[in-house]
Image (tube, rainbow, N blue to C red):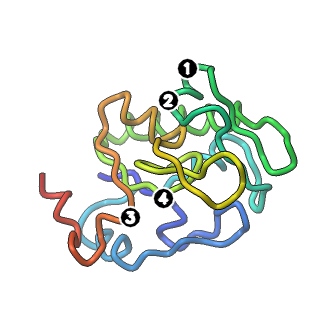
Amino acid sequence: MIIVSACLLGINCKYNGKNNRNPFVLELGKKVPLIPVCPEQLGGLPTPRVGAEIIGGAGKEVLGKTAQVVNQQGEEVTSFFLKGAAETLRLAEITGSNTAILKSHSPSCGSGFIYSGDFDGKLKEGEGVTAALLKEKGLLVLNENIFSDNQKGKDLKR
């Protein structure tokens, strides 16, 4: 079983009430059981919600309490992101999943790169809060870019 960002499956749970439907992830679901998650919803945030970014670091630093998640209105929402990460980890443990495919650039799910924290559309290296926690606990965390033309899911065969 693979944990998957619910927005990649076409579920309208993205901060703006939309989704990031990915046909390759949907196709994967025909071969492997997928567990849809939206850490921000699991953490108690509504949909739609005000967009948020990590200030002062990345997910690892949020877990270490040296960075925080703040929304565009300046409200600190770190506790929602921490709760959502913990609930996602719990689902992975319950289902025995050791792999996650999460939405790139997200303050929850991003892996490799996330938004800068300046709400300017720029990226910085790092993981979102959920991605960082899952990696810390030994899960393989990928993003939907593994399905790019040069990959087409090869990373899942490791």
**Mark toward the viewer: 4 or 2:** 2
Marks 3 and 1, the one that precedes in the sequence: 1
x and y percentages locating residue 141 in the rendered image: 34, 46
Do the residues bearing badges 2 and 1 touch, measured as CB atoms within 8 Å? yes
Q: Which mark is residue 103?
A: 4
Marks 4 and 2, the one that precedes in the sequence: 2
Task: Name the residue beneath numbered marker 2.
Answer: 60
Whole-angstrom CA distance, mark 3 to mark 1, is: 27 Å
Residue at the image point whose x is 62% and y is 20% from the top: 65
Residue at the image point whose x is 58% and y is 33% from the top: 57
Whole-angstrom CA distance, mark 3 to mark 4, is: 6 Å
Residue at the image point whose x is 64% and y is 69% from the top: 12
Whole-angstrom CA distance, mark 4 to mark 2, is: 17 Å
Q: Amino acid at mark 1?
A: Gly
Q: Residues within 10 Å of mark 2 (few under 14, many from 20)?
A: many
Give the residue at the far left of this rendering. Answer: 158
Q: Is residue 154 above or below residue 149?
A: above
x and y percentages locating residue 85 in the rendered image: 54, 37
Circle 2 SS class: helix
Q: Amino acid at mark 4?
A: Lys
